[in-house]
Image (cartoon, rainbow, N blue to C red):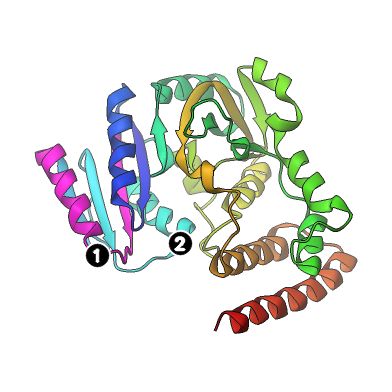
Amino acid sequence: MVGIIILNYNNWEDTVNCIKSVEKYNTAEVKYIVIDNGSTREGTVEALDKYLAKTFKNNYRKMTENENVEILSYMTFLVSPTNDGYARGNNKGLRLAYKDSEIDELLILNNDILFIQDIIPLLLRKKKKTDNCGIISPILYEGDKTTIDYNCARRSVNPWVLIHAYIFFYRDFFWVQSYASKRQRILEQSPELMQQELVEIELPSGSCMLISKSLMQEIEGFDSHTFLYYEEDILYYKLKKKAKKNYLNTKCKCVHLGACSTSKTPSAFALTKQFESSIYYLENYCNLSCLQKILLGIGKRLFRLKLKMISILKK
């Protein structure tokens, strides 16, 4: 059975639409674990609770973090009092799934994903037939269902690229950032790979990825030191140490509504969280050389100074 873990934050409408799409297309045996990650928008928890209770009736259970349940309902709604970010929020759902002996696979699913196919059985079959498979994921499209969200199949980021970004505050001097960004997006660089059913990748999109429960437990889930960004990079590092590989199944398709907004200028909050997560990733997972450590130290100081200046100018 697959445990589907969905994070909700201030957007119960997308969460409802996500669940409706899975219910419409899915034929696999599943259980849902929906986590409200400390929503601050008035009425969010109440609206989602009302929909889930009405839709799933006796197969629904609303929980708080201090409750202990071993066998979950078909639909479980965990209400967290705080927003702890992507990694910790999903880890709350993982802890529930770990206790349920009926769940043996996990689908991490963003609430801005819409199913347009019955993809879970296809992913499960391909995963079973593929040696050393860590994560398998579908190809993602934007809301028009024709434009590929290239973030669904990426190479891991080069530490030099991040160091360059901090020193120059993401300005594309010497075209380093644009070249690196294009190189990261595997399908954009090599569109002929779309002819293959299974494409080996390094980073899947964290918005839709299937992994076995036992393997997720073995790598200790998501690293709780990140709030937002670089979770996939860290997962890739952990799985690589276990000799596992990640794959994209091009025959399985989903719509990723959030992909339409990825090009927008990030807020100072998002930039700060991205910076903090990437620094943690670089310092704890990338085995930096002495020169890289020195330049990273310079980049960190410059980046923090620029963030501080942005904060002052906004006041």
Magenta segment boundaries in residue numbering: 31-58
Q: Is residue 25 left or right of residue 194?
A: left
Quarter holding residue 131: top right
Q: Which residue occupies 18% across, 51% down?
A: 49
Residue lying at 75% horizontally and 57% vertically, measured from the top left:
286
Q: Is residue 87 left or right of residue 162?
A: left
Which mark identifies residue 85?
2
Residue 207 image position (x, y, % from top left): 49, 43
Q: Please say whether residue 71 is visible from this viewpoint.
A: no
Residue denoted by label 1: 42
Residue at x-position 75% and y-position 67%: 169
Amino acid found under the numbered disc labelled 2: Gly
Q: Earlier in the sequence, mark 2 or mark 1?
A: 1
At label 1, the amino acid type is Glu
Q: Secondary structure at mark 2?
A: helix
**SS at mark 1?**
loop
